[in-house]
């Protein structure tokens, strides 16, 4: 698959970190999930996370949102340590949006009702609330299914809805957990374009993880390989697939982007 991005951001103008995980360690029982992990997201960057099942990619998202806390280490957003902030404060104060792999919407409510329910919590101004809902419905081409219950949407439409829901609070950081899972080729391409447009048009910094390595590498600026609880390699897609540690731990010898 050819790259979705027309260009790759190789150096960020300010090189300013918006999110930093430093020396993060976490155990579940006796099992080490993360071990002295360091990870940085620059402002305006799209960062991909790759690694085998159970390596801790979703756990990293749960740490960032505040669903769980690390045993050791710090999480900083805009240079402020947020370890003690609960989920709702991280969402509102630090503008974090999260798109889970499964669910993330009200099954028995229509597309419009889903958006309205979340907008009533996140947007106080009534006229702007309605404007924002209609804008997102149009942006994600959900007009034909506006009054259809979410349970009856296609996989791609459900994913578009959940991304739209996450954008109601105007996030600065968006976390996408396996956005390409179980989707057809054309829907994946549409979502890749949406992700890149979030960066270029809305200046949203994005972290996504997925097992579809080629699809992920087609739309990120940088990617990191997680192995044994650590980041063992990171770089642009073209440099990462040549990294010996990345090939040994994840890609294998025959992997190519195209």
Image (tube, rainbow, N blue to C red):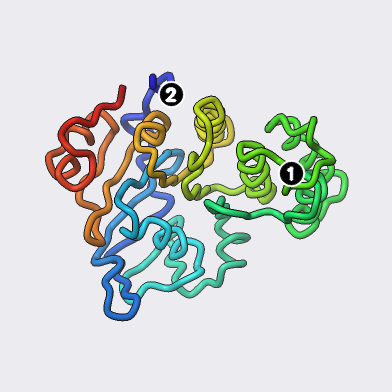
**What percent of the width, then of the height, locates residue 223?**
32, 41
Q: Nearer the viewer, residue 204 or 26?
A: 26
Task: Say above or below: 182 vs 35.
Answer: above
Left/right placement of residue 251 relative to residue 220 reads left
For mark 1, give the secondary structure: helix
Question: Residue pushed farthest bottom?
Answer: 29
Residue at 23% from the left image edge and 36% from the top image edge: 240
Q: Nearer the viewer, residue 45 or 26?
A: 26
In what quadrant of the picture does the N terminus appear? Answer: top left
Q: Give the image quarter of residue 228.
A: bottom left
Count every numbered label the image shows and give the total: 2
Density class for disc 1 (Cα within 10 Å; few <14, some 14-19, many ≥20) is: few
| Tag in front: 1 or 2 | 1
Residue at 30% from the left image edge and 26% from the top image edge: 257
Q: Which residue is mark 2?
A: 5
Left/right placement of residue 235 relative to residue 208 reads left
For mark 2, give the secondary structure: loop
Distance of label 1 from label 2 (alpha carbons):
32 Å
Task: Say above or below: 192 vs 116.
Answer: above
**What percent of the width, then of the height, locates residue 205?**
48, 43
Residue at 39% from the left image edge and 38% from the top image edge: 212
In what quadrant of the picture does the C terminus appear? Answer: top left
**What percent of the width, then of the height, locates residue 220?**
39, 34
Left/right placement of residue 224 relative to residue 175 reads left
Q: Residue 81 — which label? A: none
Density class for disc 2 (Cα within 10 Å; few <14, some 14-19, many ≥20) is: some
Q: Residue 152 — which label? A: 1
Sequence-wise first label, 1 or 2: 2
Task: Say above or below: 99 vs 64.
Answer: above
**What percent of the width, then of the height, locates residue 183?**
53, 36
């Amino acid at each position: 698959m050819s790259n979705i991005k027309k260009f790759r951001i190789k150096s960020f103008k300010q090189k300013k970190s918006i999110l930093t995980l430093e020396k993060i360690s976490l155990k579940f029982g006796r099992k080490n999930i993360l071990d002295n992990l360091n990870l940085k997201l620059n402002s305006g960057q799209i960062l991909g996370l790759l690694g085998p099942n159970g390596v801790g990619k979703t756990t990293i998202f749960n740490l960032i949102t505040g669903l769980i806390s690390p045993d050791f280490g710090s999480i900083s957003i805009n240079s402020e340590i947020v370890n003690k902030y609960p989920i709702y404060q991280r969402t509102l104060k630090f503008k974090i949006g999260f798109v889970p792999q499964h669910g993330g919407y009200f099954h028995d409510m229509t597309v419009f009702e889903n958006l309205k329910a979340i907008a009533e919590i996140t947007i106080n101004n009534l006229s702007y609330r309605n404007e924002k809902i209609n804008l997102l419905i149009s942006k994600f081409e959900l007009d034909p299914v506006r009054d259809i219950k979410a349970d009856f949407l296609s996989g791609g439409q459900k994913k578009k809805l959940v991304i739209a829901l996450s954008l109601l609070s105007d996030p600065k950081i968006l976390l996408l957990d396996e956005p390409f899972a179980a989707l057809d080729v054309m829907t994946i391409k549409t979502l890749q374009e949406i992700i890149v447009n979030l960066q270029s048009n809305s200046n949203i910094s994005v972290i996504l993880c997925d097992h579809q390595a080629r699809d992920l590498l087609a739309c990120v600026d940088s990617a990191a390989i997680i192995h044994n609880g650590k980041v063992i390699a990171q770089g642009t897609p073209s440099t990462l697939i040549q990294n010996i540690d990345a090939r040994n731990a994840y890609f294998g010898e025959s992997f190519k982007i195209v």
